[in-house]
Structures are given as structure tokens and as C-alpha cells.
Amino acid sequence: MSISGDDPLTRMGRVDFGGIIKEACLAYVPEVKVGDYVIVHVGFALSKVDEDEAQKVFEYLKQMDELAELKEGGP
Amino acid sequence: MKYLDEYRDAELAQKLAREIHRITTKPWTLMEVCGGQTHAIVKFGIDELLPKQITLIHGPGCPVCVTPLEMIDKALEIAARPGVIFTSFGDMLRVPGSTTDLLSVKARGGDVRIVYSPLDAVKLGEQNPAKEVVFFGVGFETTAPATAMAIFQAAQKGLKNFSMLISHVLVPPAMEALLSSPNCRVQGFLAAGHVCAVMGFEEYFPIAAKYRVPIVVTGFEPMDILQGVLMTVQQLEAGRAEVENQYARSVRREGNQPAQELIKKVFKVVPRKWRGVGEIPASGLGLSAAYTAFDAEKKFGLADHHVEEPAECMAGLVLQGLKKPHECPAFGTRCTPEHPLGATMVSSEGACAAYYRYRRQPT
């Protein structure tokens, strides 16, 4: 991904959609940097994907496993 | 692709499904609001992983589907005029109006073009100063930041030959309209993740409290939807009615502030007709006073059309979650994506199209 333009309202980025590269307007995500993941809709990046939050469901499922093991191993 | 594949993990999805089975003690009816979620549910067979007591009904969250017939007719009228380049998202082209559709207008020589982004339409306006370029602005809050920016940039550039036929709709008023209907069976909502990425989810707190209904902001991948269902059922089983956010990797409580600011600047809230549902107060966006020069309805002097919807199409009932697509006698016979009777069969987010594509063989 690359970013071009200085005017925050017309800032554009090249976004890689799993191999397909398209331009997207970055006006609404002033915080994004090259390498970030974004949600794009009709040519506009609408939000930056939060790495920590993205992991939470996997942690939750792991805890569920551990809880189940505890129960099985318990008295 | 990262952030997609891992949310399609079959084993982890099964784990979530088992947890839903474990905690479910009563029948519950949930509605997924967004058409994107409906497609994921039908495509991946998520409904079939759920306990029999849980019914998912498909919500009105398909912008193409809820665009009223008279708006389609207005689009057809503008598109057929000489000197007009009519631009639209591809989904709208096959949606039947009263007598024809945009694709047929194009076949008869109308200059109808599919664009990927509303900004492409602005560009066409700059490149074709002798033509009137019109963009068909349909969509929910997810699309509004894009159309708002197109209008804003057109105004900044002083484009006189660009305008928009606007049929923007808002999700929370539609949820309230559903909840206030005496036929309402919905006990919990999976709210549309990408709508909330723009708007946040503050608006849902009063709805959850007033109607005692859990609302869980939910994403679009199989594991998102299963987790959204799990969180909703957990609330229902515990007698809670709260707003929760399953899709926190993309949705913040306050939403996208710069996008909301531009929406507020360019648009104002207006009453809007929903196809198959009727008029819902304060449920749409129209241009604010400063931008009315870009209003295609005004520019082309279109009188109000009042059109009856085709009797055989039960899209209205499908959109309200009162009927499933395959319960329609025309489904898959007189109504197919190639020859649709209603918009729900056309759009990539329409419930009828989802059933046609993934559920035609009896299972």
C-alpha cells in the first residue's frame, strides 16, 4: 500500500485486497499509515482494523478450551 | 487474506456454535440487519449450525432493495434523456422500475455507466463539461461518507454539470419502525457492522432500552456472525437488553468522526419511503440547503411519481422478515436474478438473491 497527496480531504491510498490493488480515498482515516489494514467501501477507507481487538475472539475461544479442560480435570 | 481467512475457520466456528447450543434454553428470534450478513449466513450455512430454537430473520439492510419504485422510475427518466451520463453502482442496473430497468435504457442508447465510487462520477463530470453527469446515490450510512464527499468535492471544484439522485436511508429509524410494528417477532438484533463503523453505536442505546431488545454490533465473517448470535443469546437468556460490540476490530463507539462531520454538512435528515415498507419519518438523507444545486430531482424538475409495486412480488414482507424468500410462489420460476420481479432478487445483498444463489436445491 502507498499513500499520495497532502490535502487531508483528497488523500488517496493504494490498497491491496488480497492481490487486487485499488485506489481508496483516505480522507476519513487520517491516522492510517502504510501497512495498516482498513475497511474500504465504494472507494473510501472507513476504519482502521484494530490489531488487538482482532485477536480477542481467538483468546476467548482459547479461554473456553482451558475452562473446559479445568472442568474435565477437576474433582 | 489477513483478517478474513482466520474468521472463516471451520473448527473455531463449530466451537462457537457448540457454545450457542449449550446456552440456548428457549426459542429466540434474531434479525441480522445487514444484507451482507444475510449473504454470509446463507452462503456459509451459518443458520444450519444453530440450534433449532434460534430463528434468524433477514433484515431490511440492502440499500438497493429498499430504494422505492418511484426513485427507480426517476432514475430511468433522467437516464433516458439526451445529454445525460447517468452513473450508478452496478447493482442498480437490473432493478425493475415500473416499465423497464437501467440496463434496458442503456441498451436503447442511454448513456448509463457503472462506477465503483461516487468520486468516479465527479471525475466524469470534469471530463465531460458539455454533458450532465448524474449519480444515483443510494445506500445506508456506510455509503453516505462517499456520496457526501462527492458532493463536497463537486462544490469545491464549482462543477455545474454534476448532480445526484439521492435515496439515502438510515438504519436506526428502520429498526424502530420494525420494533413498533404489531407483527414484530424480533427479540434481538445483530446490528450492521459497517454502518456502525461510520456512525458508531450511541444511537442504539435508547432503542435497546425502549424496546427491551439486545443489540449486538456484528461483523460479516462466519465467526463474527456466530459470536454476534452467541452474545445476543447470552443477553436474552440472562434477561438483559444491552448494546454490545462484537466487531470492535473495526467499530468504535463514537464511529468515524470526520465522516460524520461531512455527512452532517452535506446532508440533512428527511423522511424517506422504503420499498415494501412505506414512508418512515426521519429515515433518510437529503441534501442540506447549501448543496441543493446538486439535487438531480430539482435540476430535472421531476414531479412526484406514485407507483404501485407489482402484486406478485412479496419483497416487502421479505424485507420486514415476515416471509422467507423461498415462500414466494414466484421464487426461482417467474422471478430470477436475470428476470427479477423485485429488487431483493437483484442486489448482491438481497435476501432473495442469496437464497437463489445458495439455496435452490432443497436440503
Image: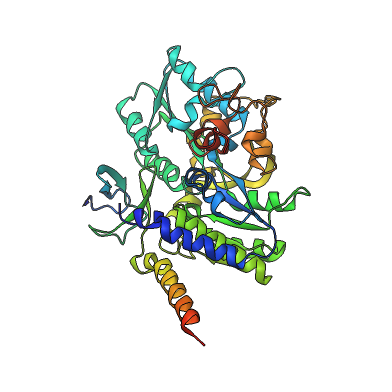
Q: Is residue B117 left or right of residue A75?
A: left
Residue positioned most to the bottom? A75
In the foreground, A47 or A49: A49
Q: Quadrant of the C terminus of chain B?
A: top right
At 26% across and 48% down in the image, what residue appears? A16
Q: Is residue B242 visible?
A: no
Residue positioned most to the right? B182
Q: Is residue B250 left or right of residue B301?
A: left
Residue B228 in the image: state x and y as whole percent.
53, 60
A55 w.r.t. B138: above or below = below
Residue B10 in the image: state x and y as whole percent.
42, 55
At 59% across and 67% down in the image, what residue appears? B22
In the foreground, B138 or B12: B12
Residue A23 in the image: state x and y as whole percent.
28, 43
B352 w.r.t. B226: above or below = above
Image quadrant assignment for residue A19: top left
B108 w.r.t. B261: above or below = above
Q: Is residue B31 visible?
A: yes
Residue A45 in the image: state x and y as whole percent.
36, 51
Image quadrant assignment for residue B62: top right
